[in-house]
Image (cartoon, rainbow, N blue to C red):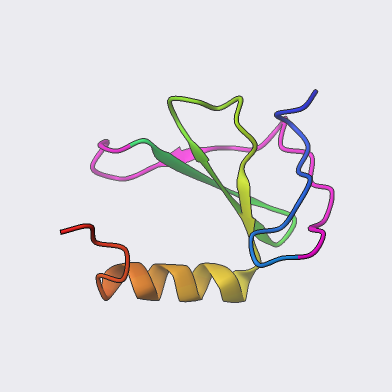
Amino acid sequence: MADSMTEERLAGGPRPELDLTQAEWQSSSQGVGDVQIAFVEGYIAMRNRRSPEIPAVIFSPAEWRAFVLDARDGEFDLT
C-alpha cells in the first residue's frame, strides 16, 4: 500500500522503510489545523490530516527538533 510505507527522507537520501499502517496519529491539542504526527521506530512522521493518502514526511529526532525550534522562531510564517 503506497500510503503506508515511506520512500524518501526529508533531509535528502533514503529514509528507513517505516510501516505506518499501525501508526498512532496525533493532532494538535487545540484540535485545529491539518497536521498530524506519529512516533514510529525512533522517527517522527508528519502528514496532512485531510490527505492521509499523500506520503508522510519523515524526520529524524535531530531534524524534528530543528524544525520545531525554527517554527517557534517564526521561520515558516508567511506574513
Q: Where is residue 10 in the image (x, y as percent from the top left)?
A: 64, 60
The residue lying toward the viewer, choosing from 42 and 13, is: 13
Q: Give the range drawn in magenta.
A: 13-33
Q: Is residue 13 above or below residue 66?
A: above
Tell me, yes or no, whether the highlighted magenta stretch contains residue 30.
Answer: yes
Q: Main secondary structure of the magenta part?
A: loop
Residue 20 placement: quadrant = top right
Q: In this view, does 50 lie above or below 6?
A: above
73 relative position to 61: left or right:
left
Q: Position of residue 14 (x, y in %)?
A: 82, 59
Q: Which residue is drawn at 70% across and 62% down?
A: 42
Q: Position of residue 8 (x, y in %)?
A: 75, 52
Q: Where is residue 53 in the image (x, y as percent from the top left)?
A: 61, 25
Name the image quarter holding the C terminus: bottom left
62 relative position to 71: left or right:
right
Residue 77 placement: quadrant = bottom left
Most distant residue in the left direction: 79
Q: In this view, does 34 lie above or below 53?
A: below
Q: Is residue 55 above or below residue 67?
A: above
Residue 73 placement: quadrant = bottom left
Q: Which residue is drawn at 71% across and 32% down?
A: 22
Q: How many marks?
A: 0
Q: Which residue is drawn at 31% across and 71% down?
A: 75
The residue lying toward the viewer, choosing from 18 and 13, is: 13
Name the image quarter holding the N terminus: top right
Tell me, yes or no, whether the highlighted magenta stretch contains residue 10.
Answer: no
Q: Which residue is drawn at 59% across and 37% down?
A: 24
